[in-house]
Image (cartoon, grey):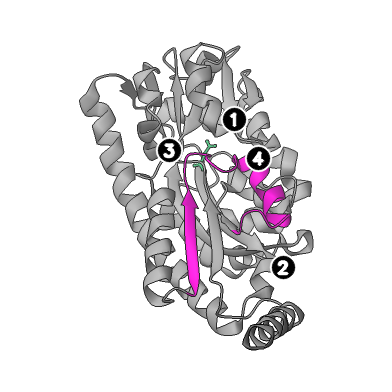
Amino acid sequence: MFRKVTTSLAAFAISAAFLAGPVLGADPVVIKFAHVVAENTPKGQAANKFKDLVEERLNGKVVVEVFPNSQLFGDNKVLEAMLLGDVQLAAPSLSKFERYTEKLMIFDLPFLFKDMAAVEKFQKSDAGVKLLESLERRGLVGLGYLHNGMKQLSSSTALRVPEDAAGLKFRIMTSDVLAAQFQAVGAVPLKKPFSEVFTLLQTKAIDGQENTWSNIYSKKFFEIQPYITESNHGVLDYMVVTSKEFWMGLPDDLRIEIKKALDEAIVFGNMIAEKKSVEDRQKIVDSGRSEIIQLTDAERAQWVEAMKPVWKQFEEKIGEDLIDAAYNSNM
Ligand code: SIN
């Protein structure tokens, strides 16, 4: 008799739970945060900080799993995976959103921003904040910008003037603007995932690549590239994104707390970015593995002149007003 009652109680409990659907608070929300860089980079550190803050404050209600070094998805696949619900957070480089919006191409225009202060100023302006919404019609929500830094050119031969790059193969991110930038100096751009760059350089399948000091250092590109031209010709920054479905499906209180933690992690990551652009550059100098080429004003002017026509080429897609707004952030 007793056995019969407990069996029917158990059956009732199972069917009630089934009908009620997942009970909020019973299972933690799991946030998978996938990225492609090493942990000792601005993005790697920001992702880890976000995990610490969320888990400390949300007391078991939210679990964050961070996957660095393209362990879960490369940047070229991560947004598709996000829309399928296989990953909840990512921070791809702004150069990797081209298939989702043309507006973010602005960040790839060569020599548009003179430094990171100008990038920050533009991102905080009305025009910059509005760009965070440019992915919404594709089901993605931009939660904030995260810095890495200005890009340098690494190469197997010394690059001082644009003609030095003619005929050389450079790996680029998946961006038509970056392709046009290298074509403007007679070089051959190849769109390849970040995870393949070291091997492509090592096997000499490519001659060079563009990246920030922290990526060149953490991925050891400096060990196999004898020259780095300190060109500061463009910016490599990120947008932290999630899917609209996941974000709007969160209970309001959790969404607010998660966003707060993310904002703080971004501030932390930006501080690391600033430090690393100096420290990782110095570590490369100290290693003696790669010669750092500093351009004279006249040499730099030649790169600007060769690459600047790319702005006109993409003006219609990006919008003249947006280019002007970004340019004015240098003042
Ligand atoms: C990244 O910093 O996320 C990767 C940049 C690249 O693909 O070069």
Note whether residue 268 is visible: yes
Note whether 60 is above or below 146 in the view shown: below
Q: Earlier in the sequence, mark 1 or mark 2?
A: 1
User: Which x, y percent locates residue 283?
Assistant: 25, 33
Q: Is residue 63 magenta?
A: yes
Residue at position x 41%, y 15% in the image: 158
Give, as a single range, the part of the protein colored magenta: 61-88
Disc 3 target residue: 212
Viewer-side label of 4, 1: 4
Q: Gap in Å between the C-alphas at discs 4 and 3?
A: 19 Å
Point out which mark residue 76 bears: 4
Which amino acid type corresponds to the residue marked 3 in the rendered image?
Answer: Thr
SS for tag 3?
A: loop
Q: Quadrant of residue 321?
A: bottom right
Badge 2: how crowded within 10 Å, few (<14), some, or many (20+)?
some
Residue carrying label 1: 172
Question: In the rendered structure, which amino acid carries the disc numbered 4?
Answer: Asn
In this figure, which residue is indicated by the disc labeled 2? 245
Q: Residues within 10 Å of mark 3 (few under 14, many from 20)?
A: many
